[in-house]
Amino acid sequence: APEPLAPTIDSARRVLKQYYGYDHFRPLQQDIIESILSGRDTVVLMPTGGGKSVCFQVPAMVQEGVCVVVSPLIALMKDQVEALKANGISAACINSSIGQAEQNSIAKACHAGALKLLYVSPEKLLSEGFLSFLQRIKVSMFAIDEAHCISSWGHDFRPEYTQLKVLRQQFPAVPIIALTATADRLTQRDIQQQLRLNDPQVFLSSFDRPNLNLSVRPGQDRVTGIINYLKNHPEEPGIVYCLSRKQCETLAGKLKEKGYRAGFYHAGMTDKARSDVQEKFLRDDLQIICATVAFGMGIDKSNVRWVIHYNLPKNIEGYYQEIGRAGRDGAPAEAVLFYSYADVAQLRDMITKDADPRLSQLNTTKLERMQQFAEAGSCRRRILLAYFGEVSETDCGNCDICRNPPSTFDGTELAQKALSAVARTREAAPLSVVVDILLGRRNQGVISRGYDQIKTFGAGANLTFLDWQSYLHQLLNAGLLYIAYEQGYALKLTEQGWQVLKGERRLNLRQFQVPEKTEKAPKGR
Ligand code: ADP
Ligand code: ZN
């Protein structure tokens, strides 16, 4: 039968089979591709490994013209283009490292309509002449990869990304698809607003990874802890994330001494040394990589069985991304975090050195959320999902807390006091002020806003500051509250928070205990 004029999901499915070898789209992929083919701006929030590439590459293949892909990392770009070419897809990339002759031949292919995917860095895209070049060829769509880089509240902000708003202005008829593995509320909002998307269809895939077992262990004697762990996981490939380059090297050395096939990876190595290590890990010649967070972006190894965090990550976004490299094949995998308060202190020092006070405050708040996760006494997966705006109704049964639950009490009334205080500030006060209100403290921050007049003022005076802090953290972790970073860090109620406040749902809390914070800093710094 002759090919219909407008590309359809059927032609997309044929491309999926022919070029990728897959028989079916994953459920969300099909909806996303239909949205794109209908010409709508589209936002895709999908965890790493979810299959985002197919979402724009396949429509690019079935549409006339070239799909311009904006991607922040030149190294990743090259890999992706090589992979596409290897599958017989006509793709190219233009960035600062590409010579004029090659650029000319790429331009020629675009004019001839022979190129399907063109990867560019944001700098290149916005550089003089490039947009007018795009005006002269047929652009099928723009795909903005790693779109969270546009949010100055995110963990990976790239100022160049904010200039991408010119695309909507200069190419009003070309659909834009924005893709990211970060899904918090602010990022979602920033992507839509900053790219000036036109009534976009938003697809949020679940960030749950039920096959991943989550646990936190005390941070003493980490090396011994890791070696014991490895004894119970013989031959299973895994990654240990360390904070410093030196730590990666030291730890890899110690593991080698014990007879493990371990290597290290960090940004201080040559390109060649890095790709060698990566290659060996992919081929299972190395069982273990001790790496900084530089490792993992764009690495497609599905049988990583465990990820260990030697140190506390700086924020939940980073932690989630790193543990997401384990168990991509869907088989059981483990994420183990070694935690000591000394890590928080060290990270806090690093963060507060930032010259920009706004960033330093933002990153401190994010670090605190990470700390609360590590110290939490409720289902870890629920905390993670709540952070990404997903509320699950049940405990997961596959984390250390679920397997070994601490004792809890019915904290509904206590929670209602706190939630009511938040509501009565019109959701405008940060956590410390809410605690002051509950305790009935008449200080400047309280009086100047008239919070001493609200009904909940002093309603929790029978408890201490630390008690209330802990309970509010538990409410954050339970997804009843969230922090609006962009509004002075104000606490706000989620839908579930309102339900508890109205008595439509009950809640268990964990008794607060003063934490032990006298531990020595671990060695090896
Ligand atoms: P992301 O960019 O979201 O991290 P990728 O696009 O790299 O994810 O895809 C992750 C893995 O899933 C890849 O190995 C990819 O080939 C595979 N994949 C994607 N779509 C499908 C599908 N429809 N059926 C089977 N496997 C798929
Ligand atoms: Zn759990």
Image (cartoon, rainbow, N blue to C red):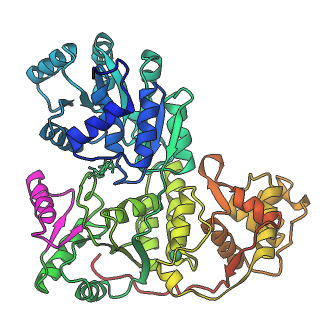
Can you say whether 67 is above or below 108 in the image?
below
- Which of the two residues, 350 or 216, is positioned nearer the viewer here? 216
Please tell me which residue is depicted at 33% across the width and 12% down the height of the picture.
Answer: 135
**Is residue 142 found left or right of 257 in the rendered image?**
right
State which quadrant residue 382 falls in.
bottom right
Residue 149 visible in the picture: no
Please tell me which residue is depicted at 40% across the width and 48% down the height of the picture.
Answer: 156
State which quadrant residue 337 falls in.
bottom left
Q: Which residue lies furthest to the front in this view?
A: 1
From the image, which quarter does the C terminus lie in? bottom left
Exactly how many numbered labels are in the figure?
0
- Which of the two residues, 331 or 379, is positioned nearer the viewer here? 331
User: Residue 160: where, in percent of width, then height?
Assistant: 38, 33
Please tell me which residue is depicted at 53% across the width and 43% down the height of the picture.
Answer: 188
**Is residue 459 found left or right of 70 in the rendered image?**
right
Give the extent of the magenta segment: 262-291
User: Residue 243: where, in percent of width, then height?
Assistant: 32, 67
From the image, which quarter does the N terminus lie in? top left
Can you say whether 54 is above or below 522 in the image?
above
- Which of the two residues, 80 or 259, is positioned nearer the viewer here? 80
User: Residue 483: where, in percent of width, then height?
Assistant: 63, 56
State which quadrant residue 82 falls in.
top left
**Is residue 186 found left or right of 54 in the rendered image?**
right
Please tell me which residue is depicted at 76% across the width and 59% down the height of the picture.
Answer: 498
Is residue 272 shown in magenta? yes
Is residue 498 shown in magenta? no
- Which of the two residues, 140 or 280, is positioned nearer the viewer here? 140
Can you say whether 180 is above or below 258 in the image?
above
Can you say whether 228 is above or below 116 in the image?
below
Residue 191 visible in the picture: yes
**Is residue 261 found left or right of 49 in the rendered image?**
left
User: Residue 52: where, in percent of width, then height?
Assistant: 36, 45
